[in-house]
Image (tube, rainbow, N blue to C red):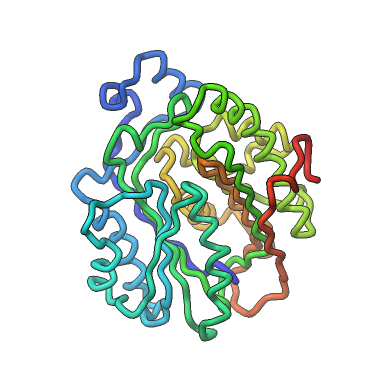
Amino acid sequence: MHIKQIWSHIPEHIVPIRELNEHLGLNHAQTKVLEKIHGLKQVRHDRDGDLSSLLGQVLAQVTGHPDVAPTSIKYIIYCHTIQENFPFPMKVLQALKRVYGLQHAIAFSLTQQNCASGLIALHVAETLLPSLEADDHILILTGEKTFSPVVQLIPNTTVMGEASAAVLVGSRGAGSHVVGLTSITLGQFCNVLTGSPQILREFQEIYIPRLCEVIVTAVEQAGLTLQQIQYIVPHNVNLSSWKKVAAGLSYPYERIYTSNVQEIGHCFCSDPYINLQAILEQKLMQPGDYYLLVTVGLGVTFSVAVMQYAETGGDGDVHGVNRFLKPTEVGVNGPA
C-alpha cells in the first residue's frame, strides 16, 4: 500500500492569534504563551464557506486531476475530530458524492481517535485494499470547520485552523510506500479536557515520553533506526512540544517539519498530509528516503506511519509491518 497523491486546500484568509482573544476568551498572558512559547502566529479561516465548501475544494482537485479516474475511487474515508460536525439531518458526504461524480464510492467516517483518525485511516485502507482491483483507490478525506470557540482552542496548547486534504491510496503506481503503522490508545485519558485536574496533569507528564516511545517502537518494528529517518512529518500542535520530542529522541529538530505551525495552526486531522505535501513540493526528500507521519489525538491515541518515498511506479520491494500496540507493550521508560 502507498500514498499516490495528496491534495490540500488552505484558505487564504489569515486570522492572527491575538485577534482571537475575545472570541476564545483569552487574556493577554494566555495569548503571549501561545505566541511566544508555543510558536503559534496565525490560523486560516474559510470565512465565506461551510463544511461542504471546505471539503469540496479538495474533491474538485481530485476529480479534476488528469491521472485520476473518479470511477477508480471505491471508498472515501472521511476523518474528523469533532464527532458531530454538521447538523442532523444534513448528509454532507452524500451530497458531495453527487456533486463530484463519486456516487459509486462507499463513504464512511473515522472520528473516535480524534486528530489521529487521519493516520488510523491508513490502517483501515490497508484492510480494504485486498478486496479491490489493482487499479482501484481509496480516498482519505480530512477537514472541518472551527464553528465554536470550544472546538478551536485547546487551552495553553494550541489553536485550531481550517484546512482540508485528500489522500489517494492505492496498491500500485507511483507514491510513498507504507512500511509500518503503529498506534496505541491510552483510554484513561478519554476525558482529558473535561475531567479532573489530576488527569490533565498526568497527561501532560506522559505526553512527550509516550510519544517518543511510540516513535522509537514504530521505527524499530519497521527494522530501521532513527538515523535512517530523513524527516518527521508531524501534526501542528505547537513548536514547544516538538522541540521536547526532538530532545527526547536526540533527533535533529530541523528535520521535524514545523514550518506550517506558525502559518496555519493545528488543522485537526489534516496536518501530517498538508505537511507531507509541502515537503514533496519543496523537494526536500530523495527517492528511497524514509520518513514518519506522526500525530496525536486527544483521548488519547499516538499514531506513527513509517513511510519510504518513491517517485516511480511499481509494486516495490519494501514489505512493512502493521502493528497496533496494546498500552502495556510500551513501557514508561522505553519500548518493552
Vertical comparison of 85 with 258: above or below: below
Question: What residue do we see at 39% from left, 38% from top?
Answer: 160
Q: Nearer the viewer, residue 196 or 320?
A: 196
Q: For the N terminus, give its image quadrant.
A: bottom right
Left or right: residue 12 versus residue 226 is left
154 sits left or right of 14 in the view: right
Q: Quadrant of residue 68?
A: bottom left
Q: Nearer the viewer, residue 127 or 199?
A: 199
Q: Residue at x 51, y 61 (%)?
A: 121
Where residue 291 sits in the image (x, y, percent)?
65, 54
The quarter holding residue 23 reads top left
The residue depicted at 35 percent of the width and 54 percent of the height is 9
Compared to residue 120, the image places residue 31 above or below, namely above
Residue most toward the left?
A: 48
How many marks do you count on the picture? 0
Could you tell me residue 176's position as x and y percent? 59, 66
At x 24% / y 73%, what residue is drawn? 98
Q: Nearer the viewer, residue 218 or 289?
A: 218
| Residue 166 pos. (x, y %) | 41, 62
x then y, percent, for residue 116: 52, 49
